[in-house]
Image: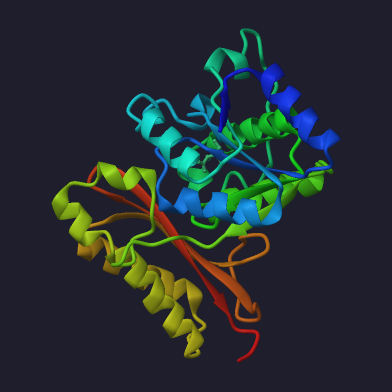
Amino acid sequence: MHQTNSIAELQHLVRTWRQAGENIALVPTMGNLHAGHINLVKRAQTLANRVIVSIFVNPTQFGPNEDYTNYPRTLTEDTEKLTKNSVDLLFTPECSTIYPPGASTQVSVHDLSEIHCGAARPGHFTGVTTIITKLFNIAQPDLAIFGEKDFQQLTIIRKMVHDLNIPVSIHSVPTLRESDGLAMSSRNSYLNSEDRTLAPILYQTLSEAKRQIEAGKSDFRKMELVYLQQLQQAGFQPEYFSVCRIDNLSIATITDKELVILTAVKLGKTRLIDNILVSLSDS
Ligand code: PAF
């Protein structure tokens, strides 16, 4: 596996691959790789001749009181995992390479970036869309892979690519879960043992809400309140629990058939997000 922190070196390799007629996938990450990330790599390998993984803990997507400084950085272990999984190139840019002094341009997807997680994390999604635009411009991949765990992020990136005619095809991979249902996430390592025992209740609650909707419950606003209360009683500090339209994440109504239930909670000091898809098209 090649590894570089240089844009010029990455672009030289990409040119060589393109001249050989190969197509290229990018898997953007912030490192601390787990099986969910490796799943993204494996999907990329089925779609492209060459796979680039980027590891960059992007400061602009963290709020002032968030975990940028403490975010787990495990480059040695990550490099081993990516080598073992036959990734072609690992791109690990320095912060000063991505954001040189004076850089002041941002990419923002309005509205969608301000709801759900965006309401509690102002500026977060602008940080994400800015870094993803930069990585797309740097690597010029044919396609890029994102996890469905960050469903709002995925939706925003799809919209950005559509709105700005960015020639990168976006692919998503379903969330990988621990055996008890907890969605895999780098932030799970923050959970203490008591919170780790409670954490699977989040997905159990989403699954129960999905069952209720499939069984015909359609008063989504009432359901949201009930599940917020249930999560609170179970020991979480829920931020939101929303039944949404899958296409634009607006609040779902009774006529909508393709839904996603999105939730974010705090458990102790750890912020967890999760979601579940519900399709009523066949019912
Ligand atoms: O999902 C993540 O790990 C990050 O938000 C991403 C997409 C790599 C951008 O920094």
Residue that sits furthest to the top in the current view: 101
Residue 39 left/right relative to 70: right
Can the viewer see residue 59 in this picture? yes
Q: Looking at the picture, how far across and down is residue 149, in whole percent? A: 49, 56
Q: How many marks?
A: 0
Q: Relative to 208, say whether 83 is above or below.
A: above
Task: Determine the residue positioned at 43% across, 59% down.
Answer: 274
Can the viewer see residue 107 in this picture? no
* Image quadrant assignment for residue 245: bottom right
Q: Nearer the viewer, residue 211 or 43?
A: 43
Q: Looking at the picture, how far across and down is residue 203, in whole percent? A: 36, 67
**Which quadrant of the figure contains the N terminus?**
top right
* Image quadrant assignment for residue 229: bottom left
Q: Looking at the picture, how far across and down is residue 114, in whole percent? A: 58, 44
Task: Determine the residue positioned at 65% across, 77% down.
Answer: 256
Q: State the colouring used for the structure image.
A: rainbow
Q: Looking at the picture, how far across and down is residue 279, in whole percent? A: 59, 79
Q: Nearer the viewer, residue 222 or 52?
A: 52
Q: Nearer the viewer, residue 65 or 61?
A: 61
Residue 201 left/right relative to 217: left
Q: Relative to 98, say whether 221 is above or below.
A: below
Residue 253 left/right relative to 274: right
Q: Relative to 121, say whether 212 is above or below.
A: below
**Which quadrant of the figure contains the C terminus?**
bottom right
Residue that sits furthest to the left in the current view: 194
Task: Determine the residue positioned at 61% across, 7% down.
Answer: 101
